[in-house]
Amino acid sequence: MQPPASQASLTAHILADPLNPFPWYRVMREQYPVYYSREFHSWFIARYSDVQRVINDPLLFSSEQSIRSRPAARTQPTVRTLLWTDPPRHRQLRSLINQAFTPRTIANLAPRIREIVHSHLDKVAHQGQMDIVSDLANPLPIIVIAELLGVPTRDQKQFKLWSDIIVSPARQAKKQAVIEMNTYFQQIVDQRRQQAQDDLISALVSTHIEGTYLTDAEILSFCRLLFVAGHETSTNLIGNALLTFTEHPAVFEELRAQPELIPDAIEEVIRYRTPIQRLRRATTVDTQFGGHHIKAGEIVSPILGSANRDETQFINPEVFDIHRSPNRHLGFGHGIHFCIGSSLARLETRIALEILLARFKDLQRVSDVPLEHVSSSFVYGVKNLPLTFQRC
Ligand code: HEM
C-alpha cells in the first residue's frame, strides 16, 4: 500500500472504504499520528499510547464540551447524559446508575437472552439461509434493553422504529422520535414512582446517594442513551463476529469443539473490527500534543480502531487470532467513561454464538451479495450479512 500523496487524501481514503480503513490507519500511525482532518474538523489520534492519554485525561479532553460544540446543541439545550458529562457530575451520575445497573441485573438476563436467540433462529432454521443482521443481531439487543427497562412487550415494535430513527442521519425525524420517546418514558417513570416493579426504571427511580436522586430528565436521557448505545453496538459486534468467522472458517470448527474459547474470540473480534471506531472529545485549554498546537475548544478524535491495530501494543496486529494473549484492546474505551454495558454486550454475543454454533454448521457467507456498511463514520458494522448453513 502506497502512502497517499498528501495528508489531505487520508480521510477521503478512509471514507471511501469504510470496511477497510486499516491500511490508512497504519499510514497515520507511522507518519501522521496526530492528524488534522479538514473533512471532520477534528484532530485524529492514531497511536495506542496517545489514544489512552486522551481518554484518560478528561480535564484536558472534555466529553461535555465536545457535545456542546455540535451545531444542534447550540440551539437546543439538552440534558447531560452520562456519556457527555465530565467530572465531578459524571462521577455522581455514574455511581447512581451503577447502583441500578449491577452485574447481577445483567447476569440474570441470561436465560431470557437464550430464549430470544432460540426463537429467532427457530424462524429461519428450516430455510438453510438467513441474514444474521436482520434475523438476529438487530432484534436481540432491542428486545433485551426494552425488557430490562420494563417496556411492555406490546410496545417493542414502536421501540424498534424509534431506535432506527435515532441512529439514522434524519435530523427532523430524530427530534420527533426523541420527543415521543420522552413522553413515553415519562409515563413509565410516573407509574413506577406510584408502584415499583422488578425493572431497571424502578431501580433508577429509587436509587439515591445520601438523599440525592436522579431527576426525571436524567432518567429519561439515560433510557434513551441505553437504546442508542446498547442497540447498534451489540448488533454490530454480532455482525462483525460472523463476518470475521466466515473469513476464517477454521475458527467455526475450533469454537464448536471448544465453546469455552468463545469469550476470547469475542474480545479478538472487538479488537480486529472495533464496533465504535472513534470517540469525540474537545480540548479545554490550548495544548501541545504530538508536536502540534491544538487550540482550546477544538475537537479531538481518538481512533480506537487504529489503537487496536497498533504494532507497538499487539504482535501481528493485522492477524485475527482468537488465542491472542494478552489482548488489551480499547474497544470499550478506557478510564472513567469505560463502557457500562460491556458485560451485557459480551453476554448477548456469547449466547448468540454458542447457540448458533450448536444448532448450525457449514455457515458461509453468500458472497455475491455486496455488504452495506452502516451509515456512520464512528461505527464499524454491516447492515446485511446473508449466510447459508446446515442444521447440526
Ligand atoms: C460507553 C463501546 C455496548 C452503554 C462506551 C464507550 C465505548 C463503548 C467505546 C466509551 C465512550 C467514550 O469514552 O466516549 C461499546 C461497544 C459495545 C457497547 C463496543 C458493544 C459491543 C453497550 C451496551 C450498553 C452500553 C450493550 C448498554 C446497555 C454504554 C454507556 C456508556 C458507554 C451508558 C457511557 C458510560 C460513561 O460515559 O460513563 N461504550 N459499548 N454500551 N456504553 Fe458502550
Image (cartoon, grey):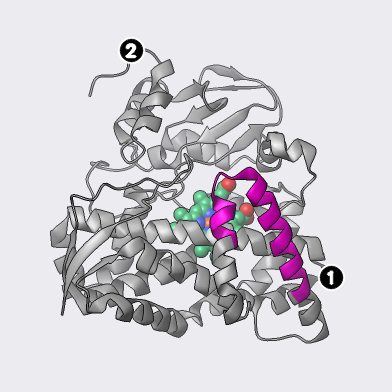
The answer, for residue 333, to whether it is visible in the render is no
Dot 2 alpha-carbon crowd within 10 angstroms: few under 14, some 14 to 19, many 20 or more: few
Residue sitting at x 49%, y 79%: 107
Quarter where residue 257 is shown = bottom left
Amino acid at dot 1: Glu
Residue 258: give x, y in percent of width and height.
Answer: 20, 73
Residue sitting at x 31%, y 81%: 122
For label 2, the SS is: loop
For label 1, the SS is: loop
Image height of 379 relative to 65, above or below:
below
365 or 197: nearer the viewer: 365
Residue sitting at x 70%, y 86%: 197
Image height of 335 relative to 352, above or below:
above
Of mark 1 and mark 2, the one earlier in the sequence is 2
The N terminus, quarter of image? top left
Q: In this rendering, would 289 be left or right of 385? A: right
Residue 382: give x, y in percent of width and height.
Answer: 36, 51
Magenta range:
162-187
Q: Mark 2 = which residue?
A: 5
Q: Mark 1 = which residue?
A: 210
Quarter where residue 325 is shown = bottom left
